[in-house]
Amino acid sequence: MSYEAYNDEKLGFTTRQLHAGYNPAEHHRSKAVPIYQTAAFELGDFERCIRLFNYSEEGHSYVRFSNPTNAVLEKRLASLEGGAEALALASGMAAISNTFLNIAVAGDEIIAVNTLYGGSTTLLNSILPDYGIVGKFVEDENDIESYKKLITDKTKAIYIESLGNPGMNIIDIEAVANLAHENGIPLIVDNTFATPYLLRPFEHGADIVCYSATKYLAGHGTTIAGAVVEKGGFNWLNGKFPQFEKFYDEYKDTIGKEALDKSIFTKRLRIRYLTDFGSHLSPQNAFNLLQGIETLSLRMREHIANAQKVAEFLEGHKEVLSVAYPGLKSSKYNELAKKYFPKGPGAILSIRLKGGLSAAQKVLGEVKLFDYMVNVGDAKSLIVHSATSTHFGQSKEKREKAGVYDDTLRLSIGIEDAEDLIVDLKHALDSIEG
Ligand SMILES: *Cc1c(COP(=O)(O)O)cnc(C)c1O
């Protein structure tokens, strides 16, 4: 057979999650993507070595820079996201931290929301400021004026998450993207909780998407990995990003102007940050991720159907004060959910319990099917008390802004039979009174 499916962008999402970016004819016709378990590649001849190192020829020299297994993963992710180019990295935090460093230099600012993943908040609040890059946090992520107020000449990006943690808040991505573009800066979206199956932020104006691929993309709780995808088309040479102008001058004659115009962000991310900060994803982990992605759409459909059922059950239980899940009519994000998440707003939800901290502790002790873990996006159902784990050490005021109270539990709904999940939660909640 011929293997044209590897680069046919007209094929559907599920077909592409199985085939995009991989041409078996280039790999001894191995049907599985081979794991290139080597540290380096033979350079061939003197002239080829020079071409590899000035990037005028695509190819592999040392695995910290690139690897054929990872290259398939990167092409597949770019295809699923509808982006120009993608880069795989060692973890979600590597993807996010390298993205910030690629976009901002000392003296610059990044605007972000209060409902970010803990590690991202720490980066912008406590780590990057020591390097002269300052995170500015908006007062109200649903009020565009809050973002506007913070924009200065030093602002180099706006950073949001498509589904917030753990309140599952949804931001009006198009409004924020428009504001960013009016100011000549990109919008970066952490799309971890949504995956490209539920939401493709580029279709709503985003310029860069970051992933913790550890979660739904890998999907089975086996692998730490991250990725960055670039839409292409943002003008990085608009005078606000001197580091990209320098890079363009340095590589325009070897990488070529056309390739740089298409995806200069990813190329600089690879050649500067992946290469010299060294957050390389091992080819074994790239393989695990490719295997996970083969069933992404199927898993997400099950995750969502279960999450909706569990959320509706929880909303009706007498011990539950409130359920934060945008798929519920009672959610203040229900309208935004319909606009941005027609397939369903993810499968993570949080609840507040009437019985406070002691009730939360009781539920954690009583669940038999849900595992007590900080991870999310596993095929298995997980539960955690955010205030004493993911948001540990944050002031009460700061964490409550993100929807984390003493009585809050976060649930990551897996793909088990929904009835079993409901029986488990019912038993745990019913046991609170005793
Ligand atoms: C887990 C997570 C991260 C960090 O990813 P790692 O793969 O654990 O480094 C970043 N953002 C979100 C939304 C996450 O859930």
Image: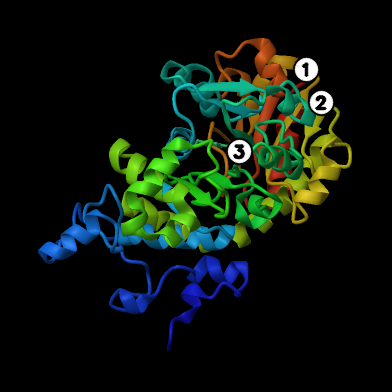
Give amino acid for label 2: Glu
Q: Nearer the viewer, mark 3 or mark 1?
A: 3
Is residue 308 in view? yes
Check if mark 2's residue and mark 1's residue have beta carbons within 8 Å: yes
- Callout 2 crowding tier (Cα within 10 Å): few <14, some 14–19, many ≥20: many
* Residue 31 lies in quadrant: bottom left
Ligand 1 within 8 Å, label 2 CB? no
- Residue position marked by numbered label 1 in the rendering: 355
Location of the C terminus (image quadrant)? top right
Mark 3 = which residue? 185
Mark 1 lies on a secondary structure that is: loop
> Residue 391 versus residue 352: which sits nearer the camera?
391
* SS for callout 3: loop
User: What residue is shown with label 2?
Assistant: 319
Image vertical order of residue 250 relative to residue 170, above or below: below
88 is higher (above) or lower (below) than 48:
above
**What colouring style does the render use?**
rainbow
| Residues marked 3 and 1 touching at CB (< 8 Å) | no
Q: Nearer the viewer, mark 3 or mark 2?
A: 3
Q: CA distance from mark 3 to mark 2?
A: 46 Å
Percent of width and height locating residue 94: 42, 37
Rendered location of residue 373, percent (x, y): 54, 32
Say which amino acid is labelled 3: Ile
